[in-house]
Image (cartoon, rainbow, N blue to C red):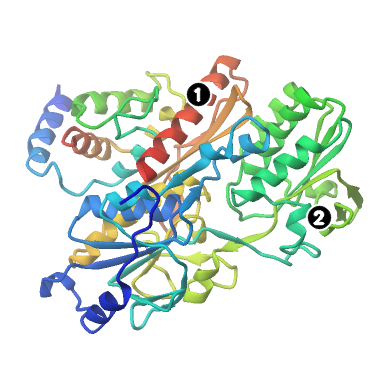
Amino acid sequence: MSPGRREFLKLGAAAAASTALCPYPVFARGAAPKVVVIGGGFAGASCARALRTIDPAIAVTLVEPNPTFTACPFSNNVVAGLRELSAQQFTYEHVAAAGITLAGTSATAVDAAARSVTLADGARLPYDRLVMAPGIDIRWGALPGYDEAASASMPHAWRAGEQTLRLRRQLEAMPDGGVVVISAPANPFRCPPGPYERASLIAHFLKTRKPRSKLIVLDAKDVFSKQRLFQQAWAELYPGLLEWVPVSRGGAVTAVDPTTRTFVTDFGRHKADVANVIPPQKAGRIAEVAGVADRSGWCPIDPVTFESRLEPRIHVIGDAAIAGAMPKSAFAANSQAKTCAVVVARLLTGAAPSDPKLINTCYSLIAPDYGISVAGVYEPSGGQLAEVKGAGGVSPAGAPRETRAAEAVLAEAWFRTITAEVFG
Amino acid sequence: MGRLLVAAIGVASIAATASAEPPAGAVSCSGCHATSARVTTPVPRLLGVDQAAIVKAMQEFRSGQRPGTVMDRIAKGFTDDEIRAIAAWYAGQR
């Protein structure tokens, strides 16, 4: 089979043969247990591969319509012209080679009672356990004026791909002396330090390429991830270039006008030459369709099993999940995915789950050679995934530039490592 | 001494079930510690590494004896028992 070609299930026959059975526990009847994973990102692809590694007897199907995955971590480097989008892109060739069946189409419905997933082509996939890793969707219209059409003139670039390139092209085309405006949303959203890393790298781009320009960050918050480290570095690297406006000083954007690239706040209007709206978000749409998203738009889960609190036998991992203190990051998604795979494999054999322990590490770049990080260790506590006290935290304040340079190197090494594990 | 003895017993008991289910926390390490030999990284690999070496490194990161960039912060989230179990599991992996 050639690279990048998707292996499709012979769905009709497979579905017809197995929906009638679906015994539980499956092993009792000698049939291979079936796990369907929806979403081929850091969470979904990691979980599918971990399931195969833990128990090769499990039949794993990964439902993902895109033949290529485009990673968000390091996409801010693409925006700032420091990296090409192709370095962010991975195929599912090795995922398929690991013995995972790829269903190269979208899931359109989930029947939790019948334990089956319906695909866009009408086929149905039965499952013993379903893992949902649908990532995020934009809440179009939640910010007045910001609909899908508006993302052409005011790109969000918060799902990597064409949007990333669009924002980059607009920055490249902007005359020196222009004004770039980024709006950052209220919590929760994908990649909490992401808006500030983006602001940093765009500031680096402007400083080196268009030094008479200005960057304004309009924020719906007063506090954000790694804030002290970002602000110290901004004062050092980008004085007078980057202005952060917190909510308490009028940073909350109440509407946008895509025809004039204008951000409206309670305190005034900001007309931008390049406008990046990081909009309010929710769990990927299929979560809502499946009934695993609550009124917040995100998915409540059990912190031991990652099982949905709303529908049995459906596990939710990654950005879509309400994972307590764990941030919506690729590292967290990967950690949850592998932990969830261990639990799902246990549950399929009828064994009881044991308390997990999870880790997150997130690097951010403030300049190509200036990295900072936040780390955390998590365990179930009080019905949530809580941070283990006394552990974790951010890079030391006031560290020498060699430390920042070392963390920038580690950031890239992390990206190579995690993408090799998931897609390599 | 006592610690070494416990570590040795840990190795012996885990060796029989080297491919067994990973203990709590173990699967998260490979986010940074590559399992593939093809990845270029300054971060050391853990597969097949001696259990005692991993235990020692973790305990030194935790106490601050060994300087780290993120491992000093992460090690503080793990107990001695957890560290020993994770180290034994990695020692048994290939």
Q: Residue at x 62, y 34 (%)?
A: A77
The answer to whether residue A343 of the structure is visible from this angle is: yes
Left or right, residue A245 beside residue B24: right
- Residue A121: where, in percent of width, then height? 44, 75
Q: Is residue A356 visible?
A: no
- In the rendered image of this protein, does residue B52 appear above or below residue A391? above
Image height of A218 relative to A352, above or below:
above
The amino acid type of the residue labelled 1 equals Val
Question: Tag 2's secondary structure?
Answer: strand
| Mark earlier in primary sequence (2, 1) | 2
Residue B45 placement: quadrant: top left
For the point 13% across and 35% down, the residue is B10
Q: Quick one: A10 or A309, which is closer to the camera?
A: A10
Residue A237 left/right relative to A55: right
For disc 1, the chain is A
Q: Residues within 10 Å of mark 2 (few under 14, many from 20)?
A: many
Mark drawn on residue A253: 2
**Residue lying furthest right in this view?**
A268
Residue A409 located left or right of residue A163: left
Tally of numbered discs: 2
Point 21% across, 27% down: residue: B49
Q: Note whether B91 is above or below A246 in the view shown.
A: above
The quadrant holding residue A73 is top right
Badge 1 is on which residue? A409
Q: As shown in the figure, which amino acid type bears the numbered disc 2?
A: Val
Name the residue at 59% across, 48% down.
Answer: A160
Looking at the picture, how far across and down is residue A208, in whole percent? 75, 23
Across and down, in percent, residue A107 comes to 45, 70
Pick the front one: A335 or A324: A335
